[in-house]
């Protein structure tokens, strides 16, 4: 197994090459994410399971991005790791939005939608945020969907919904979370991880862009 320092240097290179999630991405809005860590005696991989809004593309999507020394396919974003787990569509005739999650219609009147006109213009993104309250787990990629990206023999050693994520001024090696994640990958001991004081995985940390 690579040392924690080697793991961190690998992650820094991948982040600089835009081969791991950048939550400040100008083209994709990250709504909510989950991080999963896998390892065995010689291999390791981080899997980012993210609900996203892509206004210029497919709208509400879930993207699985993998980084590690045993990734099958491309590091980070790959087109075969996109799932349509929900839809938000404007109905001009009825002047309302049609929303569904996993092909189940969600009445928009049941959602607590808060407008954020000072941060962005997309009404759909407000709806995506509102869906998190009751439908986050359904919108995330399921184990059955992302399992094919995990090399055989790797064991899950960590799952996080909040952590300190890197940005362009703070690479992985300088975050609170990733040095601890590297220790867990090296040892397999999840007790070495402690929650950060500066968790920034919530969507609102990355606006305005």
Image (cartoon, rainbow, N blue to C red):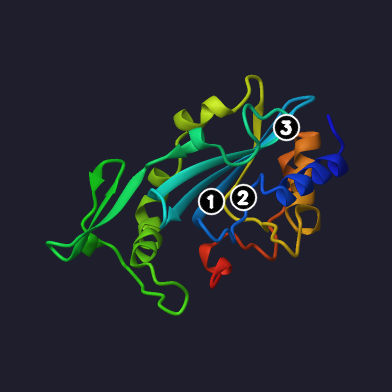
Q: Which of 131 and 168 is in front in this view?
A: 168
The picture places residue 70, in percent across and down from the top left corner, at 71, 27
157 relative to 62 in the view: left or right:
right
Q: Which percent across, then down, holds residue 147?
A: 53, 28
Circle 2 sits on which residue?
A: 21
State the image quarter where residue 72 is shown. top right
Element marked by disc 1: strand
Residue behind mark 1: 33
Q: In the image, what residue occupies the spot 75% across and 58% down?
A: 176
> Which of the pair 106/19 is nearer the observer?
19
Coordinates of residue 122 in the picture (x, y in percent) = 38, 67
Q: State the residue position of label 3.
A: 44
In this picture, residue 207 sits left or right of residue 168: left
Would residue 130 appear left or right of 94 to someone viewing this image?
right
Give the position of the N terminus as an image quadrant. top right
**Mark closer to the observer (2, 1):** 2
Query: Pointer 3: residues within 10 angstroms few (<14), some, or many (20+)?
Result: many
Query: Mark 3 and mark 2: span between their CA atoms?
Result: 17 Å
At a point 62% along the width and 28% down the height, the residue shown is 73
Q: Are marks 2 and 1 in contact (CB under 8 Å)?
A: yes
Residue 106 seen in render: yes
Q: Earlier in the sequence, mark 1 or mark 3?
A: 1
Residue 74: assigned label:
none
């Amino acid at each position: 197994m690579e040392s924690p320092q080697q793991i961190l240097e690998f992650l820094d290179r991948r982040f600089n090459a835009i081969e791991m999630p950048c939550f400040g991405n100008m083209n994709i809005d990250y709504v909510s994410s989950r991080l999963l860590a896998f390892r065995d005696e010689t291999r390791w991989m981080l899997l980012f399971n993210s609900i996203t809004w892509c206004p210029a593309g497919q709208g509400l999507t879930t993207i699985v991005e993998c980084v590690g020394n045993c990734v099958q396919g491309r590091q980070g974003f790959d087109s075969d790791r996109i799932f349509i787990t929900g839809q938000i569509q404007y109905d001009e005739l009825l002047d309302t939005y049609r929303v569904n999650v996993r092909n189940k219609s969600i009445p928009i009147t049941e959602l607590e939608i808060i407008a954020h006109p000072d941060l962005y213009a997309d009404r759909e993104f407000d709806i995506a945020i509102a869906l998190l309250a009751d439908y986050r787990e359904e919108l995330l990629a399921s184990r059955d969907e992302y399992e094919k990206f995990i090399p055989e023999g790797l064991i899950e050693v960590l799952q996080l919904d909040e952590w300190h994520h890197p940005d362009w001024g703070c690479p992985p090696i300088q975050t609170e979370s990733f040095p601890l994640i590297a220790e867990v990958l090296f040892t397999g001991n999840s007790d070495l991880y402690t929650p950060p004081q500066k968790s920034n995985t919530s969507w609102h940390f990355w606006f305005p862009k």
